[in-house]
Image (spheres, rainbow, N blue to C red):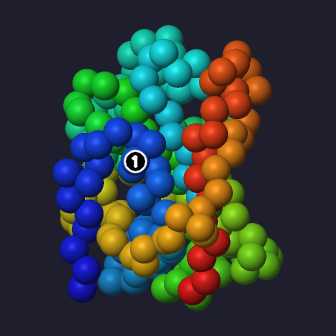
């Protein structure tokens, strides 16, 4: 069994981590069942100066986990209906995280299919809220240590993704942010086949 990524992996600049998470395996385990997906799309959010980041107004009760130690999960509720999963990066006390936007299911497909009943396989994990639904991730995972298995959610090394298989673009859903934050190419997308 592959070991989870170390805290040292996450204790680096958020743009590096966002790129290198592509192809990594996000694993969810519950009651002896395991589901896993390969991460195919990420977005980087960095610091209070990033006006698209939740830390733009400073530390609050909602975003406190952003300031936590590298490798923690920052899970938040949005639009009154969706949970989104982020990985905290960089040094503790500096608010930065990678939003996991999309993934390719590779293990526990029956479990994922049940969580995404009525959806085509291509839609199971094709957005950040779809990804959390597919794996049963909710606010109870906020603060989960993604570098350990005992929380039931972790990230392992997966398959390396060549630079030519990666594209970048602006982050999604940040139209409220002024330039240059709205258009920074801090979204990373990988073409991966299972």
Residue 82, given in percent of the width and then of the height, sits at: 64, 46
Residue 165, given in percent of the width and then of the height, sits at: 60, 69
Residue 149, given in percent of the width and then of the height, sits at: 24, 67
Instruction: Answer left or right for 22 relative to 171.
Output: left
Residue visible at 29% across and 43% down in the picture: 12
Viewer can see residue 185: yes
Residue 184, quarter of the rendered image: top right
**Compared with residue 149, is residue 186 higher up or lower down, i.e. above or below?**
above
The residue at the far front in this view is 164
User: Where is the N terminus found, in terms of image quarters?
Assistant: bottom left
Secondary structure beneath label 1: helix
Residue visible at 45% across and 42% down in the picture: 15
Residue visible at 35% across and 65% down in the picture: 155
The residue at the far top in this view is 57
Instruction: Please name whichever residue, 34 or 163, is drawn nearer the observer in this view of the structure.
Output: 163
Residue 41, given in percent of the width and then of the height, sits at: 59, 58
Badge 1 is on which residue? Answer: 16
Residue 31, quarter of the rendered image: bottom left
User: Where is the C terminus found, in terms of image quarters?
Assistant: bottom right
Instruction: Please name whichever residue, 193 or 109, is drawn nearer the observer in this view of the structure.
Output: 193
Instruction: Answer left or right for 22 relative to 124.
Output: left
Viewer can see residue 151: no
Instruction: Answer left or right for 48 relative to 52.
Output: left
**Compared with residue 6, is residue 10 higher up or lower down, i.e. above or below?**
above
Residue visible at 50% across and 11% down in the picture: 57
Mark count: 1
How would you rate the neighbour count of disc 1 (Cα within 10 Å): few for under 14, some for 14-19, many for 20 or more?
some
């Amino acid at each position: 069994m592959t070991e989870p990524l170390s805290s040292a992996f996450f204790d680096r600049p958020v743009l590096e981590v966002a790129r290198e998470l592509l192809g990594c395996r996000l694993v969810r385990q519950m009651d002896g069942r395991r589901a896993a997906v390969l991460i195919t799309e990420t977005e980087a959010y960095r610091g209070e100066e990033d006006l698209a980041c939740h830390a733009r107004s400073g530390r609050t009760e909602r975003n406190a986990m952003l300031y936590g130690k590298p490798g923690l999960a920052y899970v938040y509720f949005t639009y009154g209906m969706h949970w989104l999963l982020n990985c905290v990066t960089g040094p503790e006390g500096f608010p930065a995280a990678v939003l996991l936007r999309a993934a390719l299911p590779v293990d526990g497909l029956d479990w994922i299919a049940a969580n995404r009943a009525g959806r085509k396989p291509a839609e199971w994990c094709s957005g950040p809220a779809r990804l959390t639904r597919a794996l049963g991730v909710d606010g109870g995972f906020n603060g989960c240590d993604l570098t350990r298995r005992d929380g039931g959610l972790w990230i392992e090394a997966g398959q390396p993704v060549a630079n030519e298989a990666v594209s970048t673009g602006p982050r999604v859903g940040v139209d409220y942010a002024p330039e240059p934050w709205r258009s920074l190419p801090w979204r990373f997308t990988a073409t991966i086949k299972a």
